[in-house]
Amino acid sequence: MAGDEITEAISDQYLLDFPVAERSKRDIVCKGKAVVTDILGFDREVSIEEMIHHIYTPIEQLAASIAEEILCLNSKAPKAVMLIGGGSLTPKLPKLNDQLQLVKKKQQPFIFQDIFRFIEFSTEKTRGNYRLLKNGLTTSFDAEIHHGDQLAIEWFYV
């Protein structure tokens, strides 16, 4: 439900076929920007800020409809809401917190070692020492990471 409505808004705004709009939405959310090719064949770079600006109204409407449905089903504001699925990655959808008057809890920052929950990594065939890099600089497993950081592990032999 959520992801398709937002994809449709992106499709309309940038004149994209639906599958192209879906792929572009994911790229923009994950990478902060993407080059999109409209149905006329013109390329355009779209940043996450620009995309949010153009689809802010559909995002607000989506948050309102989700909040309304939760309140209808629950008869009162819940103590917490967990968003799942691709649509849950919609930027600014956490405005839902405001509409449900949820108490915001401080989110713990991601640290370098958290990436191993999302990637497969084996040390079976590695030898020597390693160095962790964040944005080209040596870092540690407990270093905070942020959207857009470039992370790497370099192996070297002594």
Image: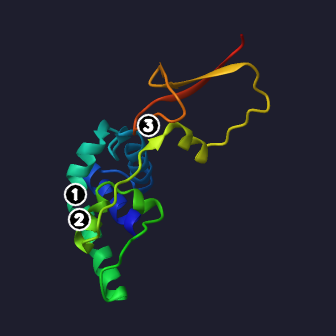
Q: Which residue is mark 1?
A: 56
Depth check: give the residue in front, 117 or 10. 117
Residue 9 left/right relative to 119: left
- Applied colour scheme: rainbow
Q: Is residue 1 above or below residue 109?
A: below
Distance between the Cα atoms at labels 3 and 2? 29 Å
Using the image, tell me which numbered label, if any, was put on residue 145. Answer: 3
Distance between the alpha carbons at the discs numbered 2 and 1: 6 Å
Q: Which mark lies nearer to you, 3 or 2?
A: 3
**In the rendered image, which quarter is residue 65 located in?**
bottom left
Foreground residue, 77 or 17? 77
Q: Position of residue 19 (x, y in %)?
A: 45, 54
| Crowd around label 1: few <14 · some 14–19 · many ≥20 (10 Å) | some
Which element is circle 2 on? helix
Quadrant placement of the C terminus: top right
Q: In the image, what residue type sits under mark 1?
A: Tyr
In this view, the residue farthest toward the right is 124
Amino acid type assigned to the residue bearing label 3 in the image: Ile
| x 38%, y 50%: residue | 25
| Of pointers 3 and 2, the one earlier in the residue sequence | 2
Q: Is residue 4 above or below residue 13?
A: below
Name the quarter where the N terminus is drawn.
Answer: bottom left
Establish if 19 lies above or below 130: below
Disc 2 target residue: 60
Evaluate if marks 2 and 1 touch, with contact meaning CB atoms under 8 Å apart: yes
